[in-house]
Every structure is written in C-alpha cells, then in structure tokens.
Image (tube, rainbow, N blue to C red):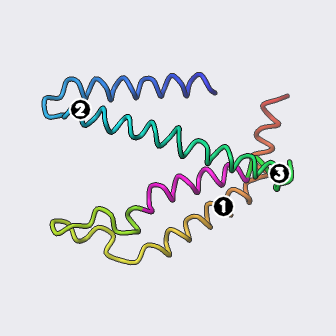
C-alpha cells in the first residue's frame, strides 16, 4: 500500500508544480514561501505531535484496540484541522460575511464523536478484513 500512496503523492506534486510554473498569474515567490512554511509546520510541529500521540496510545490503549484508536484519532484530526478555522470564523470579511453564518461548533463536535463511534463500532469489521488478507 505504501508504493501506490507514494506514487499518488508524487503525481499530485508534479501536477501542482507544473500548474504553478505554467500559470502566468501565479506568484512563484509566494508559492515557495508558502511551501517552506508548510514544510516547517509539518515536520517541526505536526509530525512530532502525531508521533507523541502514537507513543501515548501505545502506552495507554490495549493492543487489541490500538488500530481502531489510531484510525479514529487520524480521522478526527483531519476533520478538526479542516473545519476548525471555519468554525472560529477565519475567512469571514466584509465581502463574504456568510462564511458559516450559523453556530457550527456543535456540528464539529458531533462529527468528531460520530466518527469515533463509527470507527469503534466497525472495529471487528476492520479486524476481519485484515485477517482475511493474511490467509
């Protein structure tokens, strides 16, 4: 599974770089600065936090539940990272006052809870799927 994911990531990066280079309206310096900031944030902040969380999971979660807990944590983190700036009101300006006009904080919390419950409810299904592939 690792090789197809690496290949897909490389193809997406080539597509993005080619689009940035060939588009006349793109500020290449801004793109390079943005990429450098993302790289520093990912490798300097996000990656150590995820590794630390994995170590905590290994210490406090029973071995039979670790895969489900990791999957739920990653899915919940992805939902929160994408939705939290919108919930907090970033992106709202005079030209677009309708970005999330209702209180979506409760929806974000509900989404995280439902995702976690679905992962734990489907735990046996994940285990059966994994065991089938090893026979």
Mark 1 and mark 3 in contact? Answer it, CB < 8 Å. no
- Residue 80 lies in magenta, yes or no? yes
Q: Earlier in the sequence, mark 1 or mark 3?
A: 3
Which secondary structure lies at badge 1?
A: helix
Q: Position of residue 47 (x, y in %)?
A: 58, 41
Q: Marks 1 and 3: which is nearer the front?
A: 3
Q: Residues within 10 Å of mark 3 (few under 14, many from 20)?
A: few
Separation (CA) of disc 1 from disc 2: 41 Å
Res. 102 image quadrant: bottom left
Residue designated by label 2: 29
Q: Which mark is residue 85?
A: none
In the rendered view, tell whether residue 65 sits above or below residue 31: below
Q: Which mark is residue 59?
A: 3
Residue at point 49% right, 72% down? 107
In the rendered view, tell whether residue 64 sits above or below residue 10: below
Q: Earlier in the sequence, mark 3 or mark 2?
A: 2
Q: Position of residue 94 (x, y in %)?
A: 16, 69
Mark 3 and mark 2 in contact? Answer it, CB < 8 Å. no
Residue designated by label 1: 116
- Residue 3 lies in magenta, yes or no? no
Q: Residues within 10 Å of mark 1 (few under 14, many from 20)?
A: some
Q: Position of residue 92 (x, y in %)?
A: 26, 67
Q: Earlier in the sequence, mark 1 or mark 2?
A: 2
Q: Residues within 10 Å of mark 2 (few under 14, many from 20)?
A: few
Q: Marks 1 and 2: which is nearer the front?
A: 2
Task: Give the tally of numbered discs.
Answer: 3
Q: Main secondary structure of the magenta part?
A: helix
Taking 12 as reference, is 60 left or right? right
Residue at point 66% right, 61% down? 116
Separation (CA) of disc 1 from disc 3: 20 Å
Residue range (magenta): 69-84
């Amino acid at each position: 599974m690792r090789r197809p994911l690496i290949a897909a990531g490389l193809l997406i990066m080539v597509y993005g770089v080619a689009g940035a280079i060939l588009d006349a309206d793109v500020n290449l310096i801004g793109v390079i600065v943005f990429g450098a900031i993302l790289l520093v944030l990912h490798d300097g902040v996000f990656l150590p936090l995820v590794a630390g969380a994995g170590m905590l999971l290994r210490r406090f979660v029973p071995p039979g539940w670790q895969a489900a807990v990791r999957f739920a944590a990653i899915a919940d983190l992805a939902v929160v990272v994408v939705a939290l700036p919108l919930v907090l009101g970033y992106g709202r300006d005079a030209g677009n006052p309708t970005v999330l006009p209702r209180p979506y904080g409760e929806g974000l919390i509900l989404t995280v809870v439902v995702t976690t419950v679905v992962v734990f409810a489907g735990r046996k299904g994940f285990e059966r799927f994994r065991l089938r592939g090893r026979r």
